[in-house]
Amino acid sequence: MTTGKRSSGRDRTSGGTGLTPMQERAVALLVSGKGMQETATELGVDWGTLYNWQRSIPFQAEYNRLRGELKGVVLGGLFDLHKQALETLRRCLESENEALAFKTASRIIDPVASVRVGETDVRKLLESECRAKANDDMLEDIIEGHTVRYESELKRYGIVP
């Protein structure tokens, strides 16, 4: 039976990420390079819903985790190409058109190596958010080992403390 109510994306969490399958799909689409509007349209959700998901700590952690995996794959591919890149750089030193060859090699290597991957641990992101919001009571609970509120926040995202 349907209620006619739109899903908030928090109906069922899966796989210990604290995200629903639809939210996990949104993360995968965004990491693959799709834009916000394109992702929202493909998932059949409002752009604002996707924006709200993107602001959640579990979403950020999964996005960062997948982005780190992608960076690893790309870097692995670059390592496979390193001999060719080094050969190009070597030819650069001997070529009459050094600038073109050097710029080509640099533009392949530099951007991927500089990709920043954020925190992937939901617990660490939650602690950072507590600090950023100056939520001293909750942070104090974490620091002092009184984890009741901290654990309830983790449970809210479907993560076992």
Image (cartoon, rainbow, N blue to C red):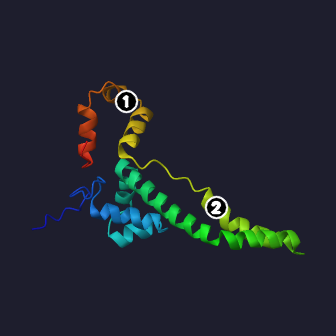
Q: Residue furthest left?
A: 1
* Label disc, if present, on residue 135 of the rendered structure: 1
95 or 24: nearer the viewer: 95
Q: Could you say whether the residue bearing mark 2 is in a helix, strand or loop?
A: helix
User: Vertically, is 157 above or below 20?
Assistant: above
Q: Quadrant of the C terminus?
A: top left
* Residue 36 visible in the picture: no
- Assess disc 2: are there few (<14), some (14-19) or many (≥20) residues with their C-alpha within 10 Å of its C-alpha: few
Percent across and percent down for residue 88 are 76, 72
Going by the image, does 149 lie left or right of 88? left
Give the number of the disc on residue 159. Answer: none
Question: Is the residue under label 2 in contact with that under label 1 (CB below 8 Å)?
Answer: no
Labels 1 and 2: the sequence-earlier one: 2
| Amino acid tagged 1 | Asn
Q: In this figure, which residue is indicated by the disc labeled 2?
A: 111
Using the image as rendered, state which of residue 141 and residue 77 is in the foreground.
77
Estimate the x, y position of residue 149 in percent, counting from the top left: 25, 33
Query: In x, y percent, where is residue 37?
Result: 43, 67
How busy is the neighbourhood of tag 1: few (under 14 within 10 Å), some, or many (20 plus)? few
> In what quadrant of the picture does the N terminus appear?
bottom left
Element type at mark 1: loop
14 or 39: which is nearer to us? 14
Q: Decide if residue 37 is in sight here.
A: yes
Q: Residue sitting at 26 percent across and 31 percent down? A: 147
Point 34% across, 58% down: residue: 49
The residue lying furthest to the right in this view is 96
Q: Residue at x 35, y 66 (%)?
A: 25
